Amino acid sequence: MKVYKFGGASVKSADGIRNIVKIVSGVDGHLFIVVSAMGKTTNAMEVVLDHFMKTDKVASLTKLQEVEQYHAEIIGELFSHTALGFEAVKPLFDSLKNYINTAIADDYDRCYDYLVSYGELISTRIVSAFLQESGVLNAWLDMRKLLMTDSNHREANVRMDESKIRLKAAANFDDARIYIGQGFIGSNLKGDPTTLGREGSDYTAAVVGNLLDAESVSIWKDVPGILNADPRIFHNTVLIPELTYLDAVELAYSGAQIIHPKTIKPLENKQIPLYVRPFGSPAEAGSVIKASTTKPIDVPVLILRKNLVLVTIRPRDFSFVLEESLSKAFAVFNKHRLKISLIQSSAISISVCVDNTRYLNAALDELGNEFKVSYNTDLELLTIRGTNDSIIQETTAGRTIMLSQRTRRIARFLLKTEE
Ligand code: ASP
Ligand code: MG
């Protein structure tokens, strides 16, 4: 069997969903389809949640109304029998409204997972019903009942053993040839919905591939495949046809947006190839990530990660022991879910580059108990792999470099974001 994953951009419009039908119709064997929320629905649901948390039900329901309207327009454009589409999503919007009217806004992360996971439930209901209307029979699955996770809300980790039993029982290909399930969502063992971290649907696809022993996993994207740089930022990009799992992990760690960092492990563990394919031109090969390649990457790879903060800490009492300070500081970053993308140490201080998230201030406060803390915001980290001086010159010219690190193969520059 194969796993196909379609992201938010692929399902953002009626045309996109028609294209899914076209792509899926071309597959003969067993298929498991993983789908994200439509377009920017996850962001919109985060706004619904924010109003709910501030106990502003009216604002929360008004925003939800916009989300419903957006989906209604797609349904209206897509279905010959629009009632089929509306029937598929009505119970979901009813439960959402009921939740907003009656639930208690206590724990942000738990409420987040309950509310925001509906984006994927709604999109899969629509895609499943439209495949059905188009004659592509399929069975819809509720991944909240199949993908078991820990209780680390908003960044949950999948419990592979428990999930395997449930997923294999539900998706046994006896009653259907094609299954469709949500990316990004699962639940803990108590049955509370959880989410796997933003952009986590790739991770779902990889986990499903691993648990069902897929022959391959394909992620359909609105790009030609994996490029050596983000074409929205850099010129003259080229396609990288083949990458190893290790290449892919390195790129994801440096902040390449193309693949969620957790995606590679479940695939590597079972040596399942991952195809990144162009949604707009399904006949093209795209890129493949696998155990070994015949063509090593021979172009420089550029990755730009934005909205970073450089935090510099120094023990208050001048008693600097690097190992001790590092482990204390890392425990704080870890507790506040701040991902570290660069570290530099000096005689009396440590500088760490982390994402600017809503947890940053709490982490800085806690560090302040033991360290003198200073920080710079609005930074970008440029990683250049397979580096040479002319590329460095070209990409950093005129920029303020806050910090740089260079090995033979990789150069990294922390740059001030340009106004
Ligand atoms: N819908 C979720 C998000 O936008 C998950 C995903 O798209 O992968 O983050
Ligand atoms: Mg998405």
Image (tube, grey):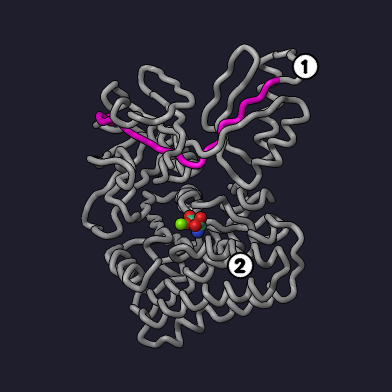
x and y percent of residue 45 in the render?
Answer: 57, 65
x and y percent of residue 300 in the render?
Answer: 29, 30
The answer to whether the beta carbon of the residue marked 1 is less than 8 Å from any atom of ligand 1 is: no
Q: Nearer the viewer, mark 1 or mark 2?
A: 1
Residue density around tag 2, few if under 14, some if 14–19, many if 20 or more, within 10 Å: many
- Residue beneath label 1, please? 317
Q: Quadrant of residue 417?
A: top left
Q: Quadrant of residue 383?
A: top left
x and y percent of residue 371 in the render?
Answer: 72, 25
The answer to whether the beta carbon of the residue marked 2 is less than 8 Å from any atom of ligand 1 is: no
Say what secondary structure mark 1 lies in: loop
Q: Tell me if residue 260 comes above or below residue 383 in the rendering.
A: below
Residue 92 appearing in the image: no
Q: Tell me if residue 138 comes above or below residue 204 in the rendering.
A: below
Quadrant location, the C terminus: top left
Give the residue drawn at x 70%, y 63%. 53
- Residue beneath label 2, please? 48
Q: Is residue 161 left or right of residue 305?
A: right
Q: Amino acid at mark 2?
A: Val
Magenta-colored span: 296-314
Mark sitting earlier along the chain (1/2) = 2
Quadrant location, the N terminus: bottom left
x and y percent of residue 302 in the render?
Answer: 34, 34
Give the residue drawn at x 70%, y 33%. 332
Q: Is residue 212 left or right of residue 130?
A: right
Residue density around tag 1, few if under 14, some if 14–19, many if 20 or more, within 10 Å: few
